[in-house]
Image (cartoon, rainbow, N blue to C red):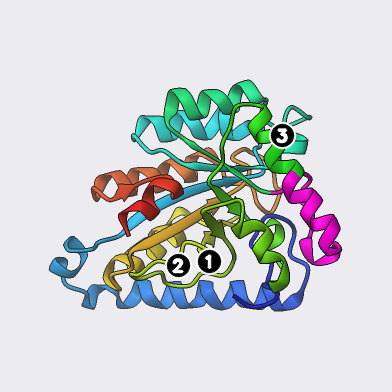
Amino acid sequence: MPASALPTGSESPKTAIYTMNSSFKLILLLAFSLLLGSCTLVEIADSPLIICLNFDDGYQDVYQNALPILDKYGIKATCFVNSGTVGSSGVMSWDELSELKDSYGWEIGAHGYSHPNLSELSLEEASAEIELDLLLFRDKGFDPKSFALPYGICPQEYLSLIKARYQNIRSTNDLAMHRPIDRLNLSYFPYHHGWSAQIIKDRILQAMADKEALLIIGFHQVGFSDNWQDCPPTILEQICEFIAERGLKTMTIKDAVKEF
């Protein structure tokens, strides 16, 4: 894994490079959708793909809007939470997170106590941030197995702090994941506000045609604002319906990696 990585979509883009990178991905996906007709039905049907839906930062509207949609289609997701913000304005409570885990089978993963940019912290500060996060989770009855890097950034020398505490690390960039899966460097494809459901559908079709083993699709808010990371519930439902209609396998991250 590189010493640092571009933002994952957890927050507003910081650089023009990231914007260019996202635009380039979008162009590739649009081109792929035009070429998809050359893929045979057999290739698609034989896809080994497992899809993981992720929701970062524990927003309240994920509980209100995303949960009923995913439950309708029998999809269990992974929710990456900043333990230090749980219960604050616009963020789910510990009781709601427990309900996601115990009643709906969702995975609750760690995302840093306060969502820091680890590259801006000293080694001691980063260690304290990561350890405090895990201690609070355990105090509340959770035992997270997966960690999503805040901002998708982590200095190489800090990775040992996370590896010592978690089995799975979601990093950044939309890289194709084929067998064998590196569970300590899981990539993902983040949704951006204003995108149609077709962009996500095309990425799924690309993964199926290319025989990718795992595709992690990331969301943040699921509501009705103009926030750049907000996904309207109608778009999320179209994506879930698309996945269900094709009979694709969906799992939480901690369960999906066991398949490899």
User: Alpha-carbon neighbours of circle 2 within 10 Å: few (<14), some, or many (≥20)?
Assistant: some
Single out the mark in the foreground, 1 or 3. Answer: 3
| Residue sitting at x 24%, y 50% | 246
Q: Earlier in the sequence, mark 1 or mark 3?
A: 3
Q: Is residue 53 magenta?
A: no
| Residue sitting at x 53%, y 66% | 185
Which residue is more in the foreground, 253 or 19? 253
| Residue sitting at x 79%, y 57% | 126
Looking at the picture, how far across and down is residue 204, in whole percent? Answer: 37, 61
User: Does residue 188 sit above or below 218 in this rendering?
Assistant: below
Q: Amino acid at mark 3?
A: Leu
Q: Visible in this render: residue 16?
A: yes
- The magenta segment is 112-131
Element assignment for label 1? loop
Per the image, the residue denoted by label 2 is 182
The residues bearing labels 1 and 2 have C-alpha atoms spaced at a distance of 6 Å
| Residue sitting at x 50%, y 63% | 186
Q: Amino acid at mark 1?
A: Asn
Q: Choose top left, top right, bottom left or bottom right for residue 119.
A: bottom right
Could you say which disc has been placed on residue 185 in the image? 1
The reply to whether callout 1 and callout 2 are in contact (CB within 8 Å) is yes
Could you say which disc has been placed on residue 136 in the image? 3
Horizontal side of residue 205 vs 149, given as left or right: left
For the stretch drawn in magenta, what is the main secondary structure? helix
Residue at the far left: name it. Answer: 42
